[in-house]
């Protein structure tokens, strides 16, 4: 029989021994070295039975097929756009995938999206040196005026919340439009600039406190107090 | 203009900044002196919001310039470290670093005669003190210019001359005197930016990107201007400049209090 | 035998006072400050990101590029002329080698992870402080690591092995051996080993054992610094 060396919800750092013994299985940012399960990142331990999972608090975004991401157009060629999605290699949108509408060959692609524009797209393929993105699909488009917030991609699930509960709450309470990219880039536009700032503050608060419990209530209270104070 | 810059400008026109500050409001400023006291004769670390810089003073002796035989020397070096932003590359100081060194720090000190260079003379025609000011950016969250200017002043205030054996021209860097660098003035630089037709101080990164023009105004206590530098691609009218100078002088008065 | 007491009164195996903090540079992907005694190192990590010129790229994995620099006013005598020196280039290189064993950059082919280290003040042990700060910054950035890397300068004056040499000891008149060491704390594997001076094989064994213990202490402080960031939920 082995031994679990840490408690559920502990914050651990790389190199820390989480468990000893062959009975345990590593998951997430935990790995096995010989008979020990070790943490490879700064993160929170999640123990369920024999599964020792490490949920990283900060991680580099790795695109997966199906991810909806926000990116900034950095370059345009004759038949593709190149997008910075916060990954070490840029994503490419081919002419064919550029829009729900038909784009003719030979068209000047900068008329559609130019360097500096932000778009929301879906990842269609990931290989070692290429990521392909499509802007064909419901809700995919070039983004209009608004703010771009950068958070670590590890925090995105908390910002969205269970079945979107957290992000919906913020949208409703602040009357803002918010689009959250899986890559940690978030677009925000408020009808009212002050409420827009509130939504921004709420997202930043989740970013800082993503690892804590009862976050939904905390954010709700935070927004209620701020909005209430204004009346 | 990009999406974010557009939005910044739109909100500014409505009188609102992204972070809720007033147009003439600086982010929180904090100064820490003697941060490198073992190595540097004077040093300081200064933060404006999340923007942070470190400055240090080193003394050396040398020969005066032939045309100013009884004046010491001030040497200013500013480096925008790659440590402080993904936009800065390693290598010798680029044009931005040089602009900050010359226009923000050096000119302000020199033109205001804040430091009496004659007091840095050891022996006329032969030996003078050289005061070397190095300022490094540690984090660029906007408005490096003002942070650099203030940090340089803070480091000068913190400085103490090292023990000096005049006969043998030997500096003992391990031993300091109680004598500091006399500052007759505190020339404080304030950068005022223009977006649409509004003026703001202490811009964040997004505001810097949305900026049309900027004016860095360096002034002394009685409101006289000792240096100015315009930047940005748009033009400025006389009234713009007049207004920006007014803001610059007023803010300089407030900032000066942080150096007391 | 005259070195019976350390110049600053420390025990022979005692580290100087350490302060460590992470997340201090908001623009960076990861950052840390590590201060040991009067030596202050700041490290920032950017990447993985595009690497130019292209011929430097490695198609099999990302490369680690370290840049160690002393601020002009951080030396112990005259002002240090800005810019890279042979010493700073050597230290940049050994820092890369000290950190690489803890990282796996196969997931980021052809890219670069840039680590910048700046010294604000120096009192010996600078390369070790830089490596320790850099490891913290990499962990702060979220890079998967086999272990952190902790580094310390071990010295030998006469027959005494001393931990965490300061400048006075480094300049000791009678001469001394200076041994910077970096380890992966959990297994004690060594990622940096340099030496100036004379040592016997037995003395080296003792040095390595002592170094491992000292690095374990440093690891605990690194650990607390990383956890501190999340304890109050405030960055």
Image (cartoon, coloured by chain):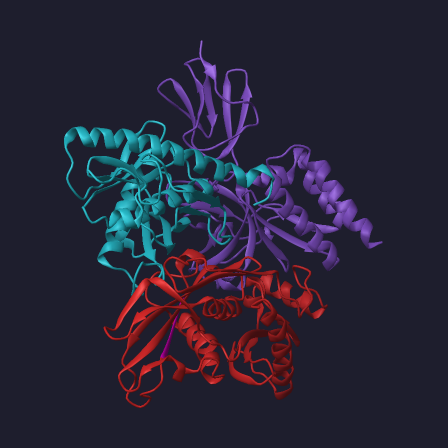
Q: Which chain is cyan?
A: C
Please say whether residue B140 is visible from this viewpoint: no
Report whether A97 appears left or right of C166: right
Q: Does the magenta stretch include residue B77?
A: yes
> Percent x, y for residue C116?
37, 52
* Above-or-below relation of C160 to B109: above
Residue C52 falls in which quadrant of the image? bottom left
Front residue of B128/C235: it is B128
> Percent x, y for residue B107?
45, 80
Residue A207 falls in which quadrant of the image? top right
Report whether A12 appears left or right of A177: left
* Above-or-below relation of A18 to C167: above
Chain B shade: red
Q: Residue at x 23, y 29 (%)?
A: C206
Q: Residue at x 48, y 20 (%)?
A: A5
Report whether C1 appears left or right of A50: left
Front residue of A12/B152: it is B152
> Percent x, y for residue C218?
39, 36
Front residue of B65/B26: it is B65
Q: Quadrant of the N terminus of chain C?
A: top left
Q: The purple chain is which one?
A: A
Please say whether residue C173 is visible from this viewpoint: yes
Report whether B161 appears left or right of B44: left
Secondary structure mostly seen in the magenta stretch: strand
Q: In which quarter of the image is the C terminus of chain C?
A: top right
> Percent x, y for residue B187?
53, 78
Which residues make up the magenta segment? Answer: B73-79
Instruction: State the residue lying farthest toward the bottom.
Output: B67
């Amino acid at each position: 029989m082995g031994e679990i060396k840490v408690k559920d919800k502990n914050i651990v750092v790389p190199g820390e021994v989480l468990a000893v013994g062959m009975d345990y299985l590593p998951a997430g940012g935990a790995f096995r070295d010989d008979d020990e399960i070790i943490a490879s990142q700064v993160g929170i331990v999640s123990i369920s039975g024999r599964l020792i999972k490490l949920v990283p608090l900060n991680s580099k975004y790795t695109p997966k097929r199906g991810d909806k991401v926000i990116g900034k157009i950095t370059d345009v060629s004759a038949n593709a756009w190149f997008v910075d999605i916060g990954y070490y290699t840029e994503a490419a949108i081919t002419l064919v995938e550029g829009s729900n509408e038909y784009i003719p060959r030979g068209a000047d692609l900068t008329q559609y999206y130019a360097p500096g524009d932000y778009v929301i797209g879906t990842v269609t393929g990931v290989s070692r040196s290429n990521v392909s993105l499509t802007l064909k699909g419901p809700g995919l488009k070039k983004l209009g005026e608004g703010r771009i917030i950068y958070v670590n991609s590890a925090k995105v699930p908390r910002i969205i919340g269970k079945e979107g509960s957290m992000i919906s709450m913020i949208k409703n309470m602040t009357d803002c439009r918010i689009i959250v990219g899986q890559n940690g880039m978030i677009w925000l536009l408020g009808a009212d600039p002050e409420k827009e700032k509130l939504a921004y503050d709420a997202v930043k608060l989740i970013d800082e406190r993503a690892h804590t419990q009862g976050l939904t209530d905390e954010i709700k209270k935070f927004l209620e107090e701020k909005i209430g104070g204004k009346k | 203009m990009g999406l974010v810059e557009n939005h910044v400008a739109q909100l500014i026109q409505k009188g609102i900044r992204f972070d809720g500050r007033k147009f003439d409001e600086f982010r929180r400023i904090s100064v820490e002196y003697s941060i490198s006291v073992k190595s540097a004769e004077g040093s300081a670390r200064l933060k404006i919001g999340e923007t942070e810089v470190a400055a240090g003073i080193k003394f050396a002796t040398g020969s005066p310039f032939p045309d100013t035989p009884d004046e010491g020397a001030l040497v200013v070096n500013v480096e925008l470290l790659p440590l402080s932003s993904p936009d800065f590359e390693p290598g010798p100081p680029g044009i931005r670093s040089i602009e900050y060194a010359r226009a923000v720090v050096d000119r302000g000190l020199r033109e205001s005669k804040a430091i009496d260079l004659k007091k840095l003379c050891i022996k006329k025609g032969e030996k003078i003190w050289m005061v070397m000011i190095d300022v490094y950016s540690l984090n660029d969250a906007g408005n490096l210019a003002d942070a650099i200017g203030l940090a340089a002043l803070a480091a000068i205030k913190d400085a103490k001359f090292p023990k000096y054996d005049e006969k043998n021209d030997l500096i003992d860097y391990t031993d300091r005197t109680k004598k500091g660098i006399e500052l007759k003035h505190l020339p404080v630089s304030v950068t005022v930016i223009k977006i649409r037709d509004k003026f703001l101080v202490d811009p964040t990164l997004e505001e810097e990107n949305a900026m049309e023009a900027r004016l860095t105004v360096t002034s002394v206590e009685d409101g006289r201007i000792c240096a100015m530098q315009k930047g940005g691609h748009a033009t400025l009218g006389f009234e713009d400049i007049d207004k920006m100078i007014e803001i610059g002088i007023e803010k300089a008065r407030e900032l000066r209090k942080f150096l007391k | 035998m005259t070195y019976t007491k350390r110049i600053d009164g420390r025990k022979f195996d005692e580290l100087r006072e350490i302060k460590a903090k992470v997340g201090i540079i908001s623009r960076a992907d990861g950052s840390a400050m590590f201060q040991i005694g009067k030596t202050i190192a700041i490290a920032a990590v950017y990447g993985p990101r595009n690497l130019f010129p292209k011929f430097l790229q490695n198609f099999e994995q990302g490369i680690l590029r370290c840049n160690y620099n002393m601020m002009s006013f951080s030396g112990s005598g005259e002002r240090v002329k800005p810019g890279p020196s042979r010493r700073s280039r050597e230290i940049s290189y050994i820092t890369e080698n000290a950190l690489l064993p803890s990282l796996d950059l196969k997931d980021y082919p052809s890219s670069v992870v840039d680590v910048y280290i700046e010294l604000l003040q120096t009192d010996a042990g600078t390369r070790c402080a830089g490596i320790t700060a850099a490891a913290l910054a990499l962990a702060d950035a979220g890079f998967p690591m086999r272990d952190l890397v902790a580094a310390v300068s071990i010295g030998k004056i006469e027959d005494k092995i001393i931990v965490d040499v300061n400048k006075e000891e480094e300049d000791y008149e009678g001469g001394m051996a200076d041994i910077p060491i970096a380890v992966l704390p959990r297994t004690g594997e060594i990622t940096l080993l340099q030496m100036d001076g004379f040592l016997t094989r037995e003395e080296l064994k003792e040095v390595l054992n002592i170094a491992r213990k000292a690095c374990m202490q440093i690891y605990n402080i690194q650990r607390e610094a990383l956890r501190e960031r999340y304890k109050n939920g405030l960055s």
